[in-house]
Amino acid sequence: MASSINGRKPSEIFKAQTLLYKHIYAFIDSMCLKWTVEMNIPNIIHDHGKPITLSNLVSVLQVPSSKSGNVRRLMRYLAHNGFFEIATNGEIENEEEAYALTVASELLVKGSDICLAPMVECALDPTLSGSFHDLKKWIYEEDITLFAVTLGFGFWDFLDKNPDYNRSFNEAMASDSKMINLALRDCGFVFQELESIVDIGGGTGTTAKIICETFPNLKCIVLDRPQVVENLSDTNNLSFVGGDMFTFIPNADAVLLKWILHDWTDEDCIKILKKCKQAVTSDGKTGKVIVIDMVINEKKDEKNITQMKLVMDVNMASVNGKERNEKEWKKLFVEGGFQDYKISPLTGFLSLIEIYP
């Protein structure tokens, strides 16, 4: 007699097993993605100018012929997940498989205008991604980040102590900024009538430079950690300031917080917002704060968008940050001393929030 779980049908149990196994081996998705970036495969296909056959790819990669089948299995899996397209080349005997780029793998072509390969390399560094093996230990610890459980100190201290990873992190953030810049091109209304803006945590100025080019009369200031901006040069309407946003934010008509607040606890976010309010209300002015971040909306978002946002929420455990829904955002704004806000869509999973004193 077949066993059952609480009277479940065998088909239900098998479906549940599939779900379990999918998540057990989900790490392979990330590792395959890391492999294709490390092997520079998107660039190889791009430079080839047309779909590349398996035999040609193996030749370019200079891997042993005995590993040809393994290259094929990795490419087949990546194609199944939307990173490549498999085509057949009628001009080649037996119609050998050939691989073409998709929109997703086009985003991994190094040297292109928009490239997220640095994000892959940074996020999947084993020193940090390995921290998620310690979720159980972290959940019992008081007031300590997941990274601190594994590394012995917090993420920002880790960056200060590891120049190579700090450089990798800045490159990753700059690559992501180019995606946001693509969205901001249609959001000129946000920056109109402003004379000055401070980009908090603006890194090497990728976003600020786009804003400056679009609005040449707008004065932009990038505030970031001293070691990030110390060797960067000012231009006519762009300047870099090293400092701590918890201590001081330069006065301006607006403050931009792009993917900043999700890094911090509610208490820290309120401190940051209060400093922002001081900066945009100086000299009797009434400016605004521009927040670019996620707004979780499980009722309205598509399932895959919600899944992305919830994955990022778990990811923010690494620094004791969080992703928030509108109710949680509103609470922060009110406690930070702001009276009103407006949420607008920006990218597939990011929103643009304007908040007013």
Image (cartoon, rainbow, N blue to C red):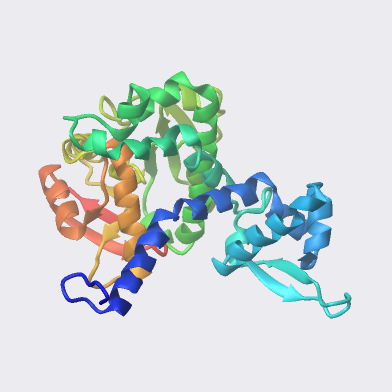
- Residue lying farthest to the top in this orientation: 161
**Does residue 76 appear in the picture of this structure?**
yes
Q: Quadrant of the N terminus?
A: bottom left
**Does residue 291 appear in the picture of this structure?**
no
How far across and how far down the image is residue 290, in percent? 31, 50
Name the residue: 19% across, 52% down: 329
Viewer-side residue, 212 vs 86: 86
Name the residue: 34% across, 31% down: 147
Instruction: Answer with left or right where residue 62 lies relative to residue 269.
Output: right
Give the image quarter of residue 244.
top left
Give the image quarter of residue 152.
top left
Name the residue: 42% across, 62% down: 347
Marker count (numbered): 0
Give the image quarter of residue 138.
top left
How far across and how far down the image is residue 312, in percent? 34, 51
- Residue lying farthest to the front in this orientation: 1
